[in-house]
Amino acid sequence: MTPSSIILGIGGYLGHDANAALLIDGRLVAASQEERFTRRKHDGRFPENAVRDCLAIGGVAPNDVDTCVFAEKPFQATFFDQSGEPGNAFTRWLGRIVPEGVAGWYTKPARHLLPRASFHFAWHHISHVAGAFHTSPFERCAFLCVDGKGEDYSASAGVISDDAIDLAWEQPYENGLGLLYTLVTYHLGFPSFGSEYKVMGLAPYGRPVLSDRLAQLYTTDERGGLRLHAPVKFRWDSMSSAVQLVTEATGIPARGKGDPLTPAHIDLAASLQKIFEDEVFKMAHFVRAITGERNLIFCGGCAQNCVAAGKLRAARVFEALFNSPVGGDMGSGLGAGALYARMQNKGTPLRIDPRGYYLGSEPGPAPSTAEPWKLSYQGSLHDFIAAELALGKTVGWVRGGMELGARALGARSILADPRQPGMQSRLNLAVKFRESFRPFAPAVLAEHAGEWFDSTEESDFMNYTANLRPELRAPLLPAFASLKEQLDFQRCALPSVVHVDFSARLQTVHADVHPDFHRLLRAFHVLTGVPILINTSFNVSGQPIVRTATEAWECFLNTDLDLLVLGDEVFRNPQQKSREQKLAWLTQFANSA
Amino acid sequence: MAHAIRQLGMMIITVCSRLLFRPVAAGWVRSKRRADDLIGK
């Protein structure tokens, strides 16, 4: 049967994480990120490879696409970038009447690829909201979208249902909460784009004693209306010069990339995270008051802060909260496509099944060079790998369609046994080549999550944190002399997946959402009595997650991983490369690390 | 050339915009965005 509607959503193309999503007759068929093809992390160029991948998965030709929706309004964004002022009715009127050719610099590559498609441009935040809402369990809810920058604003709030979107309030300008987080992230010596999650991971090691000093940088109010005094912009030059403002306010010198982390820097990370959480809570209370809604969608790049999302959900500011797993820009194409599909449907409920977010292409066959290193095994793959994991082996796990979003969810993952002493350092330093303090996420059988953590609510996509149950915690020492001492302290039976404050970024694994990964976890549980595995993305520091079997093999050769699973085949690591050779290979990703 | 024309156009729009509208306040403000403008440029 010929489909009546083929919609392609394109997002992230004005800044970072360019992506594409394909919806056929209101059904999400594929979604993909450009960085996985170009191997440039957070690639923000036109996502031609991602588009072609989506079309191939959907079995449609470029000429078949009848609608292309972009997840931003280029005219409004350009106006803001040029003038420094948010748009208004005048610019929106102009935006409606200018012909496509005026935005030609923006649409040209898409027009070249999709000659027949009509083009549309969705508000950036509304794209986030639509993507979250139509994959959420809600029929009507409030939304809070917070990110670095939409066209000319940094936060928005309102109500969405199947037949209406009421965008009621917004925070114009870009120097808001998201930019504050990014600015301090720069100051802390993590200058590569998208490093905010490192600061979030660092924060629990410190004390939030510098919040008052940081507060000199901005004004805020009881509704979370934070704005920096300085007109800082999301540009390298603007951010670099503004770092000095953080130094002046806090008295703490900026840390150079790779320099040792001092206790003051760690306290600064904790203080920033505290401010962030306080402001998000104020915003949530404000949104609850103005909308009166019981349920909330939390989305936008700032919603990737799963610590804040977890605390917000646990605090019950709203009765239920949904934090979109692809609420950042990597899912904005999906949102833009969903927005157009809902407008076509005119109020008919549109529910998008993201199929566990395994929406990308398959890895393909193993490279022929891997053949000599193939292992034979008896019984099922899942039982064999579970046994190897229980022996302390680290495993690259590449099976099925690639995940959409920043998290590996069991299709392009590195897996390990969380009971093994020193596994956190081993994975960080010899496999991922990244900072030793970085925690790992536990993938836990959903039916057993409550036995280990204080929340039984779903976190299927690592989108919330929960805490280790109190009876499983060792009493903490009153003080630690160093970060290393704090890191090495045996705080529980699974220290590599439980942070120093006993929080964990859970992936609850349900049999109906992640069936293959569930089977592996179940096998590990039967063998060890522990329903939990370390699950981290299959990449090294600064590298996009591997996509194909060939990329996985190359990454495997350059790390100290023990085993690699490609489909149903298992390979052992030849270990033919010296550490120096591996580090040399790693340098190609250094700028993104 | 196209870039220069675009810059010039934006400057003219900025001047017109400033003559017609005051800059908006910071913090939460009521959205003036129109629902029928959801997918326009």
Image: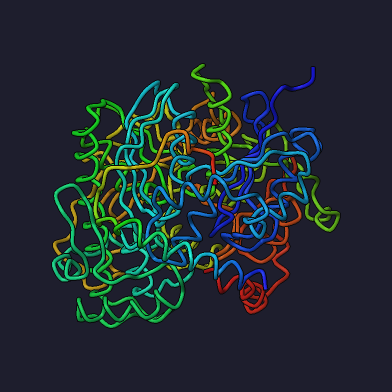
- A282 in relation to A352, above or below: below
Residue at 21% x, 73% y is: A481
Q: Is residue A416 visible?
A: no
Q: Is residue A312 visible?
A: yes
Residue at 54% x, 48% y is: A330
- A143 in relation to A436, above or below: above
Q: Nearer the viewer, residue A266 or A533?
A: A266
Whole-percent x, y for residue A41 in the image: 59, 62
Q: Nearer the viewer, residue A326 or A549?
A: A326
In the displayed structure image, the side of residue A379 where residue A311 appears, left or right: left
In the displayed structure image, the side of residue A591 where residue A260 appears, left or right: left
Residue at 82% x, 53% y is: A367
In the displayed structure image, the side of residue A422 where residue A246 appears, left or right: left
Q: Nearer the viewer, residue A181 or A501?
A: A181
- Numbered circles on residues, count: 0
Residue A104: name its quadrant: bottom right
Q: Quadrant of the N terminus of chain A?
A: top right
Whole-percent x, y for residue A46 in the image: 66, 56
Residue at 33% x, 77% y is: A243
Colour scheme used in the picture? rainbow
Whole-percent x, y for residue A281 in the image: 22, 45
